[in-house]
Image (cartoon, coloured by chain):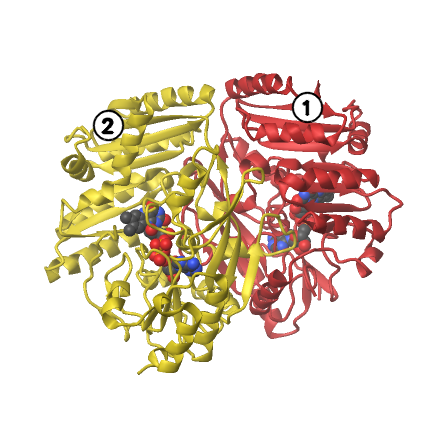
Amino acid sequence: MPEFTPSTTQELSEFLQANAAGERQAFQIVGGGTALEYGCPLSKPVTNIFLKKLNRVIDYPTRDMTITVEAGMTIAELTKTLRAEIQELPIDVPDPKSATVGGILACDVSGPRRFGHGTLRDFLIGVTAVDGLGRTFHAGGRVVKNVAGYDLCKLLIGSFGTLAVITEATFKVQSMPVPMADAWELIGFDDLSQCDAAIANLSSSACRPVAVEVVNQKAARMMAEANEEPFHSTPWGMAVMIEGSEADVHWQCRQLQSEWENLDGRVLHPLRDYRRKTWPPVKPQSTVRVTLPPSKCLNFLEVADAMDVALSAHAGDGVVIGVLPNDSAPSLVQQLREKAHELGGRLTVELCPSEWKKELSVFDQSESTLRLMREIKSKLDPYDVLNPGRLFS
Amino acid sequence: MTAATASAFLDRLREIVGEDGLLYDPAELLVYECDGYVVEKKTPDVVVFPTTTEQVVKIVQTCNEHDVPFVPRGAGTSLAGGCLPIGGGVMIALTRMNKILEVNLRDRYAVVEPGVVNVHLTRHLAGTGFHYAPDPSSQGACTIGGNVATNSGGPHTLKYGVTVNHVLGIEFVQPDGTLTEIGGIVDEPGAYDLTGLFVGSEGTFGVCTKVIVRLTRDPVAYRTMLGVFETVADATHAISDIIGAGIIPAALEMMDQGIITALEDAFHFGFPLDAGAVLLIEVDGLEVSVDREAREIIELCNGRNAREVRTADTPEKRQLLWKCRKQAFGAIGRLSPSYCTQDGVVPRTKLPEILAAITESGNRHGIRVVNVFHAGDGNIHPILLFDERDQDQIRRVMLASDEILSKCIELGGSVTGEHGIGVEKINFMSQLFTEDDLAVMDDVRKAFNPDGRCSPQKMLPTAGACGMEHHAPIEKSHPTRRAAM
Ligand SMILES: Cc1cc2nc3c(=O)[nH]c(=O)nc-3n(C[C@H](O)[C@H](O)[C@H](O)COP(=O)(O)OP(=O)(O)OC[C@H]3O[C@@H](n4cnc5c(N)ncnc54)[C@H](O)[C@@H]3O)c2cc1C
Ligand SMILES: Cc1cc2nc3c(=O)[nH]c(=O)nc-3n(C[C@H](O)[C@H](O)[C@H](O)COP(=O)(O)OP(=O)(O)OC[C@H]3O[C@@H](n4cnc5c(N)ncnc54)[C@H](O)[C@@H]3O)c2cc1C
């Protein structure tokens, strides 16, 4: 079957209906194509469904602070549209020029500012999608508060295209102060107990940072090299982001610096835009994402640092992204996963050589979750035609 | 004798919860014939009061063995009839499972049993620097389990979000008796957001037995204001202006003249009786920003002909302003023997239009309507006043309600912002959703509740369960709704 690039939801719906009634060929859904190797290997031969023609703004009533767009729209385009009205969707997306609205929803992308703003779950209020039987369905709507029916928006976030193809999404957006300001404050530590004290201090600080990032020296060196800019020279660095009106930001930065004076750390000069520069600019070979209770995050960092992993963590949320050394083996992942479990966390393999996936499970879902996921999948995509095997077998 | 009253069945329940955990005397059951939605009534055959998760599991298993339907219930403050035991059977009342199991400030979460009353958690956290953000107006009575099942909102949802934005994980007993945990303190990549899906499922996915909620830091500073306007239209335009200016207040609540009068009669707050509407506005955040935001808000209100904007400059005055908002429902009793609170939502820029439509509908049908609502969210609560002894008034209230909700849909909104569909609004579902939408929702329900034994015939018009006809077993008595509190 040839590849398919629908221009409307209806076209896609008819196509998938015909498929369900006929050949039951399997498909891979492609947004920006930046993360197709994420997840488990597909379990069947697939043809691509490209979303790139579904890239329009459907409705943008700016004063209601909601926007409805098609799922193939790139994040850069969405950001540009919102910026023109001094509004934003505060979700940090790597590679926004390529990544699409559908792609970030399917992968449940979140970045540093989730500490202050939350995740996509907090912003998606309506969705249109086509399931494996070709049924077009909607959930939610265009109002910020709505409890009519099941919240299928939530179901589709993080579903990796295994239940339905998302074709339209409505977000609640935020307006930005004018003039909008942001700043990073950076502090360096010799050991993690100092860092721990600094994070504990944030819980009682008069400031309300939107991001709390902790980076080890190996990661700092990688970022510095890639950006041709000096970074911190201490074993550990903590970068804290402040955002808001100029007056707010100015006051908080001063406040934070004075609070930090009593800590065992060295206040450093931050990078201009730390956020963008924390993403590994060169695609690494193997990365893992570890999610932990926030208070256990530093314990994990300590262990992984000793294993020569480059580490960058959304420490306030307990999310650690680790770039493995190039000569690693799957056994390193196993060791890290065991440590994560010991600390009450989970480890997901984001990127790795494809042969690793034969012996390593990519995800780390609980049995009860998997049981219900299979049940739901069997209802919305009974012939397993959408991204088969991507999340579970 | 039904399966649920058979002595073997009752004996089994008695073994699980003990004699004092069981009600089956018809007189005692009357209390449970309805919740805050009193239009439709049906007594359950049995009410059980489990105190542990294990007991809930056993109760559900027993219901399965005897093919008896069951329905979970919290405090029974639902305004959509969510607790109505359609088809009779067992009502599982969770109010005795009311322990706060854990509070972890460093990781910002608390673990609670479902019967914990919302305000008890708030009180428990007082002084820690953290709070649980969702604060429905019924928070003095309603339970966290009920809040999770209905995805409750409240005055502070404008800035802080509804219940789903504060729930990290759920333990629940599936309708087949399996004990299941979803979500948790830690993110689970590669998992569907089943926790998010469960929130708002109105008791149709199973019985929630434990909730992990997110805790939010207390704001450093507040400014609470009361804007007094000549007309409702001026007040609604001011709302749009405030939000359009990029200020997201922590709360933005509106009360119209009818409510102001009732509140004055009841509590003597000193409100101007001739004002068309008042706005209760609260901003919170850093000390540096609240004053600037408050100044801006006052300017914007003045730009919409506000008569005055009062600022509560002491904590006592702030509390007084909030007290009057939270007691608004209590004061309505003074206006009318019965009332019906509707719950629609529109894009907030459409507030002037919907409010005009509400007035028109009220006039057309000769029904007095007063308004108190979460204006910042576009979530309206027109309160229709009537006398339930007059059948014709009841009919006209129904017509006016219908018109108002249909208008909400027409304006791009929804028929419920926070109270849910329950049995009350089931007929609107096919107006809001297509056949395919409903079929997919029904499929999702079947993944959790394949036999439909748990909360049968709620929320979805398509759900046929246990061979029961929707309306047959319900005694339609008073089409009225008094506040449950
Ligand atoms: C260098 C790099 C670093 C990254 N780091 C992070 C990180 O730290 N944190 C993080 O969260 N993410 C990270 N990502 C992932 C990134 O955010 C994804 O690239 C992005 O979300 C995918 O968008 P896309 O449009 O390119 O999707 P695609 O790559 O096209 O698709 C990704 C997945 O989503 C499915 N999908 C796409 N569109 C739809 C749709 N409309 N409906 C249903 N399913 C669909 C696809 O089938 C596929 O399974 C990183 C990516 C890169 C390249
Ligand atoms: C005066 C008044 C003011 C109100 N104000 C608001 C408001 O501001 N915002 C708002 O959102 N709502 C409001 N409500 C509606 C109501 O209080 C909420 O819906 C509340 O969440 C219900 O909680 P409850 O414990 O009373 O649940 P119940 O009424 O007992 O049950 C509600 C639904 O939840 C299900 N349920 C209850 N417990 C469980 C459980 N443990 N597991 C599974 N399902 C369960 C029931 O089956 C039912 O479908 C108000 C009601 C009144 C009477």
Residue A148: horizontal and vertical position, in percent?
Answer: 40, 56
Tag 2 subunit: B
Query: Tag 1: residue type?
Result: Leu
Residue B478: horizontal and vertical position, in percent?
Answer: 18, 63
Answer yes or no: is residue B227 visible: yes
Q: Which mark is residue A174?
A: none
Mark 1 is surrounded, within 10 Å at the Cα level, by few (under 14), some (14 to 19) or many (20 or more) other residues, namely many
Residue B200, relative to residue A227: is it above or below? below
Q: Which of the 4 image quadrants contains residue A9?
A: bottom right
Q: From the viewer's perspective, is B471 left or right of A188?
A: left
Instruction: Give the chain coloured red.
Output: A
Q: Quadrant of the N terminus of chain B?
A: bottom left
Residue A28, relative to residue B343: is it above or below? below
Cα separation between marks 2 and 1? 46 Å
Disc 2 designates what residue? B228
For label 2, the SS is strand
Disc 1 designates what residue? A186
